[in-house]
Image (cartoon, grey):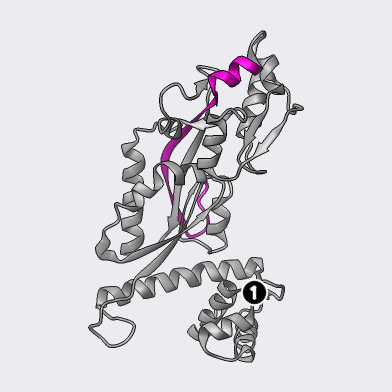
């Protein structure tokens, strides 16, 4: 059975994780670094597990991730309760201070539809958003560590303490400018020409282009010039200016003037199923965010795989 956890120790652990060092946590809490160290050590003794690796910055152990995830959920509930009671940061009756929800979202969603979803959250809730841009295959890791309260992810398997809803699929097509296609792809089948053409990659986690080539050619690797451009808008511009070919989501291609880029392989697509994962909390702010995100995704008319 989990022992009772003192709130001052829990808040100190969260401050240490968020600030990165005991000294910075001490400044944030207006206590001494020694007090921070003692509280964290006392919490570890109470739990019987090491929670923080004393590195720079401090890092959570596996046990620490579990505890921090639930500590952040408690902090969310505490903030929601204060808001419902009309309690401000000072005297009762003062306006409640704005609260913040941390969200992990993939770059292509962020560049196309996700900000429109956030705009649907009622202003009356006074919720600020802290967005963490991460590949859709890795956003669930931020949920698991307690770093975010919700995430757009490609994982249908719920993180412990979370619920999952489908958001439909993002459809990607191999695209390039007509001039690029004429220069690099003429005179032979696409599966022979495309592997040697320059390609634009989002970052080192981006496998969409390699997956497309593997499906097209049956080969797992190809010698070609690769441009890594880790910003969604810049990535689109790189393809639209002829730097290379790349996998472009339909929602982003629609932002360009007609015929700026062309589909190199009509009928061949890569589809990425997206899901919304969130903490299992009865939180008005989190519920409003989830409703806004799922409605925005539904309005796009996406199918689910």
The quadrant of the rendering that contains the N terminus is: bottom right
Considering depth in this image, is 266 or 67 the residue closer to the camera? 266
178 in the magenta segment: yes
**On the picture, is 88 further left or further right than 234?**
left
Is 29 on the left or on the right of 205, as rendered? Answer: left
Residue at far left of view: 93
Q: List x then y, in percent, for residue 12.
A: 55, 82
Magenta segment includes 276: no
Give the residue at the far right of this rendering: 223
Dot 1: within a 10 Å radius of its alpha carbon, few (fewer than 14), some, or many (20 or more) residues? Answer: many
Instruction: Tell me if residue 19 can be seen.
Output: yes
* Residue range (magenta): 156-183
- Name the residue: 45% across, 44% down: 111
Please provide percent x and percent y for residue 187. Answer: 66, 8
- Residue 8 shown left or right of residue 208 in the figure: left
Residue 23 in the image, given as x and y percentages of width and height: 63, 83
When the figure is inspected, residue 54 is found, relative to residue 246, above or below; the finding is below
Q: Which residue is depicted at the point 58% across and 75% down?
A: 19
List the residue tagged with mark 1: 51
Looking at the image, which residue is at 72% across and 31% down? 225
């Amino acid at each position: 059975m989990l022992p009772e956890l003192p709130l001052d120790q829990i808040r100190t652990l969260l401050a240490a994780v968020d600030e990165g060092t005991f000294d910075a946590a001490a400044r944030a809490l207006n206590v001494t670094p020694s007090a921070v160290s003692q509280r964290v050590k006392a919490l570890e003794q109470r739990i019987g597990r090491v929670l923080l690796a004393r590195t720079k910055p401090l890092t959570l152990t596996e046990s620490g991730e579990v505890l921090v995830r639930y500590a952040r959920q408690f902090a969310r509930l505490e903030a929601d309760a204060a808001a419902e009671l009309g309690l401000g940061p000072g005297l009762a009756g003062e306006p409640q201070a704005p609260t913040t929800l941390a969200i992990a979202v993939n770059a292509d969603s962020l560049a196309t539809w996700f900000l429109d979803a956030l705009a649907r959250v009622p202003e009356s809730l006074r919720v600020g958003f802290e967005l963490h841009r991460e590949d859709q295959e890795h956003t669930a890791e931020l949920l698991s560590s307690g770093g975010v309260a919700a995430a757009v992810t490609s994982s249908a398997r719920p993180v412990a303490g979370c619920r999952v809803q489908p958001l439909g699929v993002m459809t990607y097509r191999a695209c390039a400018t007509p001039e690029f296609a004429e220069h690099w792809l003429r005179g032979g089948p696409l599966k022979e020409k495309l592997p040697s053409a320059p390609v634009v990659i989002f970052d080192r986690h981006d496998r969409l282009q390699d997956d497309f080539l593997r499906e097209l050619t049956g080969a797992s690797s190809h010698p070609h010039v690769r441009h890594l451009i880790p910003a969604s808008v810049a990535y689109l511009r790189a393809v639209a200016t002829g730097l290379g070919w790349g996998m472009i989501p339909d929602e982003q291609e629609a932002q360009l003037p007609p015929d700026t880029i062309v589909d190199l392989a009509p009928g061949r697509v890569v589809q990425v199923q997206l899901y919304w994962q969130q903490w299992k909390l009865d939180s008005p702010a989190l519920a409003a965010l989830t409703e806004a995100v799922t409605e925005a995704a539904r309005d796009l008319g996406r199918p689910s795989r």
